[in-house]
Image (spheres, rainbow, N blue to C red):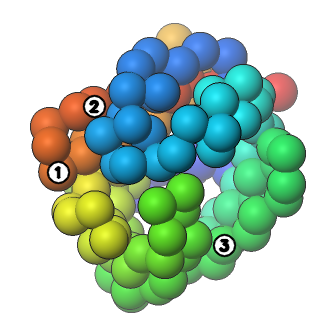
């Protein structure tokens, strides 16, 4: 079930993000920079095709199509990602140097986009974005 994620989203709240980065062996300087950033995410969506631009300390853009594997760069290094729909959630299976990760994005009843990230260790964090 495709959900429309298109729009500009601003990070408004993070839960357990630093602990998640620590579980991924991200060094202290990068963790501090990442946790202090308040990224804005611009999502363009055409059905199952996405362009996602994240604007924080630096700008990063990725493009992907549901069901096709793509490469991305995360704080722990290069990763391989495959996106799929899981009900109303945009689900990402990520093969990273630190093991398998799962990220899910969903738009909840409050109109916000929730990004839940789960590390192989079981550490979970939630990042909440409000539509601008």
Any part of residue 21 in sight: yes
Percent across and percent down for residue 121 are 15, 43
Image height of 58 relative to 122, above or below: below
Q: Is residue 15 left or right of residue 121?
A: right
To which residue does mark 3 refer?
Answer: 62
Instruction: Please give the name of the residue rendered at 64% of the width and 77% of the height, measured from the top-left corner.
Output: 63
To which residue does mark 1 refer?
Answer: 120
Image height of 5 relative to 12, above or below: below
Are circles 2 and 3 on residues that touch, CB within 8 Å? no
Closer to the chain start, of discs 2 and 3, is 3
Instruction: Please give the name of the residue rendered at 53% of the width and 19% of the height, measured from the top-left corner.
Output: 14
Packing grade of label 2 (10 A; few <14, some 14-19, many >=20) is many
Q: Is residue 35 left or right of residue 106?
A: right
State the CA–CA distance, disc 2 to disc 1: 9 Å
Instruction: Please give the name of the residue rendered at 28% of the width and 62% of the height, measured from the top-left corner.
Output: 98
The C terminus - image quarter: top right
Percent across and percent down for residue 124 are 27, 31
Closer to the chain start, of discs 1 and 3, is 3
Front position in the image: 83 or 49: 83
Q: Secondary structure at mark 2?
A: strand
Image height of 124 relative to 68, above or below: above
Determine the image quadrant of residue 8. top right
Instruction: Please give the name of the residue rendered at 46% of the width and 27% of the height, measured from the top-left corner.
Output: 17
Packing grade of label 1 (10 A; few <14, some 14-19, many >=20) is some
Q: Which mark is residue 124?
A: 2
State the CA–CA distance, disc 2 to disc 3: 23 Å
């Amino acid at each position: 079930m495709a959900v429309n994620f298109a729009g500009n989203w601003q990070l408004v709240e993070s839960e357990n993000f630093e602990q998640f980065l620590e579980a991924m062996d991200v060094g202290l300087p990068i963790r501090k920079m990442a946790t202090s950033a308040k990224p804005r995410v611009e999502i363009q969506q055409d059905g199952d095709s996405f362009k996602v631009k994240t604007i924080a300390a630096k700008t990063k853009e990725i493009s992907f199509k549901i069901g096709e594997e793509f490469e991305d760069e995360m704080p722990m290094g290069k990763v391989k990602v495959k996106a799929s729909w899981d009900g109303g959630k945009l689900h990402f299976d990520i093969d990273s140097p630190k093991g398998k990760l799962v990220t899910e994005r969903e738009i909840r009843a409050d109109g916000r986009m929730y990004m839940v990230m789960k590390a192989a260790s079981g550490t979970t964090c939630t990042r909440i974005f409000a539509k601008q």
